[in-house]
Amino acid sequence: MTASENGDVDVSGGKKSQAGSYAAPALEKGLDILELISASPQGISQQQIAKRLNRTTTEIFRMLNVLERRNYLSRDSDGSYQLTLKLFELSHRHPPTKLLLHVALPLMQQLAEDSRQSAHLAVYHQGCILVIAQVDSPEPLSFGVKLGTHFVIKPERTSALVLTAFAQNARAAQMAEEMLQNDDSGLTAEELEQKLRGIRAARHYLNPSQTTAGVVDVSCPIFGLDGTTVAALTVPFLSQNNITVQVEDVQHMLQNTAYLISEGIGMRRK
């Protein structure tokens, strides 16, 4: 144990860096690995990690083994490593995510009651769209998406389109590229950009579902404090003879709910 000149005590046994903080080489190595893999959505091998980080394969092997055992990483059959959703699950304990769910859930409940439809809230995470909140329709017959469901990001996924359309430039480009890589319909980059421009201009997405017959998807972005998109709020509209609420009504309800959620988590008024 050592004490600094200002009275701070170091119980780590580490050495101070030039910036005045104490070095923790093993932790730095693990964080470097996580950050590198997070930038490699298609996976990356042990040899590639070692080369990119200028480390020996032995050093990397020990660290990868621990991270895999602790379920931060998963290893594919070809030996490449990818991040699991554990970091994302841990982030749910972080106040901003708690705030989003705290604000969104009661408003989503009211939306479901007024629209007679289910609703779900989805976020982007490592090439996937993950449903982090869901409320059921009060009707005995309805269509909904299960809480915790995750989809590979594709152009036919409503939440993926909305999140990409309103993402900041670098993130938007990354997500668009991932969508085109996962697409099997022959969609071109120009066609995708045209679709995204239309969503941005309308400030919402309303279109027959490309994955479920008879359902019309209606979706709006949720904006955070700095104006970035943090989630997409979606209603999969199922028309029924005994329900008088029309899809256009739901669109307006959804836009109002999305605005209230955004405002509730700190979006600045323009």
Image (cartoon, grey):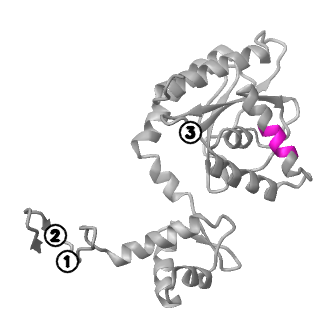
Q: Quadrant of residue 8?
A: bottom left
For the residues marked 3 and 2, what is the alpha-carbon distance in whole angstroms?
39 Å
Q: Which residues are magenta?
A: 191-196
Disc 2 packing (10 Å; few <14; some 14–19; many ≥20): some
Q: Secondary structure at mark 3?
A: loop
* For the residues bearing labels 2 and 1, Cβ distance under 8 angstroms: yes
At horizontal 70% and vertical 22% (from top left) the residue drawn is 117
Q: Secondary structure at mark 2?
A: strand
* For the residues bearing labels 3 and 2, Cβ distance under 8 angstroms: no
Q: How many marks?
A: 3
Q: Quadrant of residue 108?
A: top right
Classify residue 11 as left or right of residue 57: left
At horizontal 49% and vertical 86% (from top left) the residue drawn is 55
Name the residue nearer the viewer: 8 or 89.
8
Name the residue nearer the viewer: 48 or 236.
48
Disc 3 packing (10 Å; few <14; some 14–19; many ≥20): some
Figure check: 188 above or below 115: below
